[in-house]
Image (cartoon, helix red, strand yellow):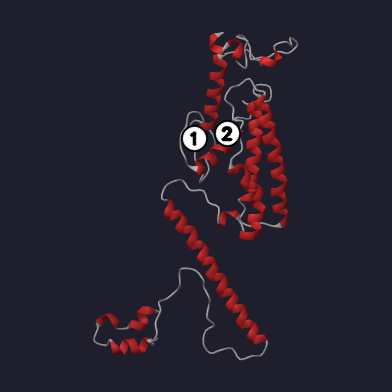
């Protein structure tokens, strides 16, 4: 009795896992206490995680118990594998709390998949908003289940910013575009390089957009019958990266060759350049 904290425990019975508030109801039967059963379930889960099929860019794990890392990508991959590995272990009868948690994880993965699309339409945004309501319902059901559970130390407080931020994800996508362009998980390693790669892609996209706009303007002038300017249409690029180098006195390549005729490095300079 001392190991289950006697009357102060959530499951005071030393034989089964009957909740404290259900001790008076003798019509219900609860699972018996068994260390062997718990170890068998943990071993089964561990085996299914270990044997989980391997895919490209999917982290593989040997266990989901007593692990420690701070890599957001690994947590995401672990949640995917835990859902399928735990379906035949955390059943409604064997573990109502675990089963409800799997329902929360399932909705979370659905949301993550919808939000992570490269291209969004009105229908995909509607799917995100609908799944947000499902996630909200499942999370509330889990909290209720955890509050009445006989298992101690279950997480009851879900009031943290990351839970709420999904409320604004559709608005962010409408204003900024697909979430993958500005919302990235890093693995905690070489973070600067990963951020610079995203910045590079964004600036390359802006440059391409400006090029297309310039071509559209050129075609518009031609359709109006106006004479297009002799010089190239300047491309405005408001980033911190610009192509070329500033110069006040542009020179022709043939002039550069003549001025440096005695320098072997400038021999056939035009051919080397193009």
Mark 2 or mark 1, earlier in chain: 1
Residue at (33, 82) in percent of width and height: 269
Residue on which disc 2 sits: 82
Q: Is residue 145 above or below residue 221?
A: above
Indicate the quadrant where residue 37 lies. Answer: top right
Residue on which disc 1 sits: 61
Does residue 228 appear left or right of residue 61 in this picture?
Answer: right
> Where in the figure is residue 252, as x and y percent of width and height?
39, 88
Q: Report the residue that reaches farthest toward the right.
A: 27
Binning the other alpha carbons within 10 Å of mark 1 as few (below 14), some (14 to 19) or many (20 upward) gives some
Compare residues 120 and 129 and report the one nearer the observer. 129
Residue at (52, 27) in percent of width and height: 47
Residue at (54, 9) in percent of width and height: 2
Q: Is residue 68 above or below residue 19?
A: below
> Where in the figure is residue 17, as x and y percent of width and height?
64, 15
Compare residues 3 and 99 and report the one nearer the observer. 3
Binning the other alpha carbons within 10 Å of mark 2 as few (below 14), some (14 to 19) or many (20 upward) gives some
Tell me whether circle 2 and circle 1 mark residues in contact (CB < 8 Å): no
Does residue 118 appear left or right of residue 189 in this picture?
Answer: right
Tell me, for residue 224, which label it has, or none: none
> Where in the figure is residue 155, as x and y percent of width and height?
59, 30
Q: CA distance from mark 2 to mark 1?
A: 10 Å
Does residue 166 appear left or right of residue 206 in this picture?
Answer: right
At mark 1, the secondary structure is loop
Q: Is residue 273 above or below residue 155?
A: below
């Amino acid at each position: 009795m001392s190991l289950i904290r006697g009357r102060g425990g959530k499951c005071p019975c030393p034989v089964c896992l009957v909740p404290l508030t259900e001790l008076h109801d003798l019509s219900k039967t609860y699972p018996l206490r068994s260390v062997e059963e718990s170890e068998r379930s943990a071993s089964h889960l561990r085996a299914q995680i270990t044997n989980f099929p391997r895919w490209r860019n999917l982290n593989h794990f040997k266990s989901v118990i007593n692990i420690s890392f701070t890599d957001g990508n690994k947590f995401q991959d672990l949640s995917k594998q835990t859902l399928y590995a735990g379906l035949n272990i955390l059943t409604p009868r064997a573990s109502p709390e675990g089963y409800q948690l799997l329902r929360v994880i399932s909705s979370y993965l659905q949301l993550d998949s919808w939000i992570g699309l490269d291209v969004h339409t009105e229908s995909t945004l509607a799917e995100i908003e609908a799944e947000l309501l499902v996630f909200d319902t499942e999370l509330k059901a889990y909290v209720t289940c955890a509050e009445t559970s006989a298992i101690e130390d279950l997480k009851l407080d879900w009031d943290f910013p990351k839970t709420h931020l999904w409320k604004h994800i559709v608005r962010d996508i409408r204003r900024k575009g697909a979430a993958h362009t500005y919302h990235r998980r890093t693995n905690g390693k070489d973070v600067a390089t990963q951020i610079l790669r995203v910045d590079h892609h964004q600036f390359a996209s802006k440059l391409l957009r400006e090029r297309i706009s310039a071509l559209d303007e050129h075609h518009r002038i031609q359709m109006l019958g106006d004479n297009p300017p002799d010089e190239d249409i300047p491309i405005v690029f408001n980033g911190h990266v610009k192509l070329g180098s500033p110069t006040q006195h542009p020179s022709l390549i043939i002039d550069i060759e003549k001025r440096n005729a005695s320098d072997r490095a400038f021999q056939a300079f035009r051919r080397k350049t193009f």
